[in-house]
Amino acid sequence: VSQSSGGRAPGIRICSPSCPSTMSPGEKLDPLPDTFILQPPVFHPVVPYVTTIFGGLRAGKMVVLQGAVPLNARRFQVDFQCGCSLHPRPDIAIHFNPRFHTTKPHVICNTLRGGRWQAEARWPHLALQKGASFLILFLFGNEEMKVSVNGQHFLHYRYQLPLSRVDTLGIYGDILVTAVGFLNISPFAEGGSEYPVGHPFLLKSPSLEVPCSRALPQGLWPGQVIIVRALVLPEPKDFTLSLLDEAAHVPVTLRASFADRTLAWVSRWGRKKLILAPFLFYPQRFFEVLLLCQEGELKLALSGQGVGATSLGQQALERLRELRISGSVQLYCVHY
């Protein structure tokens, strides 16, 4: 991966012999560009639930809501708010309100501005059902929000207030929430789909214990995406994502070194190729790694931002048989 020093984004640290190898007492973390910062997911919040959205909303962000609708549910709402005050009531840029208690269940979207509701938009044929679980994606574009329910497009709602004013998420009403996730939309088009696939977050699942291994029975083929979401532990030592072939050789490893704060591709013979990108892997930070297989190479994105690729050759990718993840992290999602 190459990048000229003049084009570096703020906060990028390029390793050289003069760089310190360890963090000295009192040393501050390198500042990260806002686009690389991800808010950790929240599991089993008590409703009503109100939380700050780190960095606010902007085009390219995505909020994932996992949960279930109680059998006796009448209505619930998800509000993307401009503040969290009780009096006066804050403006609500986007009010998403499924209603189950009417003869024809439906969803209302609206905007609250200056204490007054605007003209509401209504969608019949509610995609949510009482007693059923769901995974809702809220995707924020330049001019509108799109919503999918269980992987299917449901609605889109045009902004009536600037998205930049939104800094608070509020969830109210008859809803059981298992997880709320905050992500950036993948820079990789996933099979040309209008929506990214909503892979759920899992908390302390036996299948996500570290070290973690996943079989790749067919190898990797163009278009496949590996997704890893995790939280760095309080006293980290390392993090590695390795791909093994049929002979148990490791053609390539993605390794984060906490000692010198570098991220690198490591070849089968131990040769390191530094990735010149912000170092995200600090204690208690949440991150996402995306690897896209494309015609003999793996493209890498960190927390939704593309940071280059490494070449292996298509035959080497097809011979891969195992994904291994190890190190000082708590895994929340592994998918491919």
Image (cartoon, grey):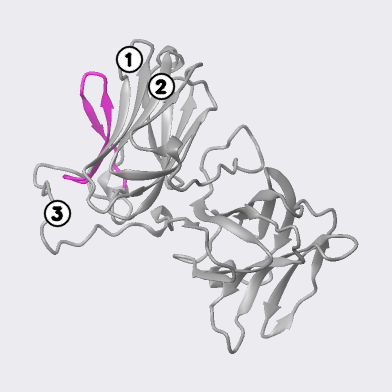
- Separation of disc 3 and disc 2 at Cα? 34 Å
Q: Is residue 123 above or below residue 133?
A: below
Which of disc 3 and disc 1 is earlier in sequence? 3
Can you name the residue that lies furthest to the front here?
72
Q: Work out which quarter of the rendered image holds the N terminus and state it.
A: top left
Q: Is residue 96 visible?
A: no
Spot occupied by residue 86 in the image (x, y as percentages of width and height): 57, 85
> Considering depth in this image, is 90 or 328 the residue closer to the camera?
328
- CB-based contact (under 8 Å), mark 3 and mark 2: no
Which residue sits at x=69%, y=65%? 174
Q: Is residue 23 visible?
A: yes
Name the residue carrying label 3: 23
Spot occupied by residue 210 in the image (x, y as percentages of width and height): 34, 37
- CB-based contact (under 8 Å), mark 2 and mark 1: yes
Of discs 1 and 3, which sits in the foreground? 1
Which of disc 1 and disc 2 is earlier in sequence? 1
Which of disc 2 and disc 3 is earlier in sequence? 3
Assess disc 3: are there few (<14), some (14-19) or many (≥20) residues with their C-alpha within 10 Å of its C-alpha. Answer: few
Mark number, residue 248: 1
Which residue sits at x=71%, y=63%? 158
Assess disc 1: are there few (<14), some (14-19) or many (≥20) residues with their C-alpha within 10 Å of its C-alpha. Answer: few
Magenta residue check for 78: no
Q: Is residue 58 left or right of residue 101?
A: left
**Magenta stretch bounds:** 258-277
Which residue sits at x=26%, y=19%? 268
- Give amino acid for label 2: Glu
Mark number, residue 322: 2
Of discs 3 and 2, which sits in the foreground? 2
Judging from the image, what secondary structure is the residue with disc 2 in? Answer: strand
Spot occupied by residue 102 in the image (x, y as percentages of width and height): 87, 65
